[in-house]
Amino acid sequence: MFYARENENDLDDNPLTILKRGFSVALALAVFGFAIATRWLLFAESAPNAWFHFFLCGLIGMGTAYLVIRITQYYTDYDHRPVKSIAKASTTGHATNIIAGLAVGLESVMAPTLVICTAIISAHLLGSTSGLKHATSGVNLGGLFGTAVATMGMLSTAVFVLGMDFFGPISDNAGGIVEMSGQSDAARTITDRLDAVGNTTKAATKGFAVSSAGLASFLLVRAFMDEVVAIHETDTTSTSNADVVVFDSIDVAQPEVFVGGCLGAATVFLFASMAMNAVGVTAQAVVREVRRQFSEIPGIRTGDQKPDYATCVDIVSKEALRGMVAPGLLASFAPIATGLFFRLFGTWVRSEEDDGLLGARSLCGFMVFSTVSSILLALVLNNAGGAWDNTKKLIETGAHGGKGSGAHKASITGDTVGDPAKDTAGPSLHVLMKMISTVTLVMAPLFVGGGGGGGK
């Protein structure tokens, strides 16, 4: 709070610069606190250097957060090339605005994906070389634990990132109040700039959320595999196979695993489609109501009568709740149905070679593919939506003809398309990937059969 505030030297600065300064201070404090915490809590005499390895894992998580936020800023802030390219495309029409926005969203996936992948591999490698082993079995536990520590390092700045997320809707609503209250153009110019920064911070915090969710889901996949082995070994119907069960990896060349993965990826896209469609259906209902009021209450046009706001609010509330029932059911039951189907498939069709884990293996493929698809699609939707929104803000500053121009009208279309992408479908995918992993972990006993053959 003390560093993320304006002073007399910041009057001409980009508001985003002030927020980034606060984030840098939060990051520095997190580094200091993480060093103390790892030395105090993770020091072990059997592996005296392990704590330092895990401290480095925490730094990897913090670096991941910083890079993802900066990459998102590049793709959504109108001071940079991507948004400027969409604004330029808007001068030739609505379709070219949409094409350019989709291109920016798709392009924005590669850089954060490289950062996330590097973080997972680096943290796992650092943890594996820490010397941390199980006290009785001697199994190396450091790799997975290192990834968990990196996830905690990434979340160490979550409080400030959450504050940046709040900045977006606050500045947006401030702009609405200024406009409705008839304030001067100068006041509106200030709130427009703050709103543009808010769009960038919202996109950045969503990138942060999807990256941390990706790291957490990786850990949940491993937890699911360990839970399946534990259930299989304690199952009275599989005691003869308990000593030969190995489930530390999945073979994507196995048809059932590959099919489970395809179903997981398809579930993500279907879920996003349902979320987007829910917004579209609700918007259509509101538009019909607005048209009805204009035709039946002529005083609205002249300002003699007020619109019936309550009816529109009621429509939005009811349709929003109704529209999310199907996506919620899909997220809950798709992994359960997949796991149960392949468990029964293994029992009835592959009975001679089934070890009771075909359902779990297929579901593990479902989890992995759905997680990867969720990360990539969420990045596309979040960044494209933020870029479309700030394209409109850029043009409203006077670029390419300013307000009322053809480019401005095209940018409004892009912003309208981008809103459900960045505010509904994109953020909901963060929840989806963690929900799938959690549901499968909790329901793990359903997917483990007795097994009729040898292990795989």
Image: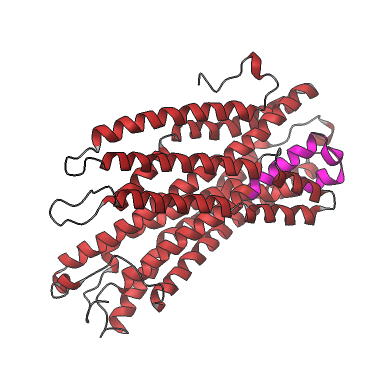
Q: x%, y% of residue 419?
A: 65, 46
106 relative position to 116: left or right: right
Q: Residue at x 70, y 27 (%)?
A: 191
Name the magenta segment's main secondary structure: helix
Per the rendered image, the range of residues in magenta is 384-413
In the displayed structure, 113 sits above or below 7; it is below
Q: Residue at x 24, y 55 (%)?
A: 140
Q: x%, y% of residue 141?
A: 25, 52
Q: Hey, which quadrant is residue 61 in on the image? A: top left
Residue 117 appears in the picture as rendered: yes
Residue 390 is inside the magenta segment:
yes
Residue 319 appears in the picture as rendered: no
Q: How many numbered discs sit on the rendered protein?
A: 0
Q: x%, y% of residue 290?
A: 73, 44
In the image, 454 versus 146, the foreground residue is 146
209 relative position to 291: left or right: left
Q: Residue at x 63, y 38 (%)?
A: 199
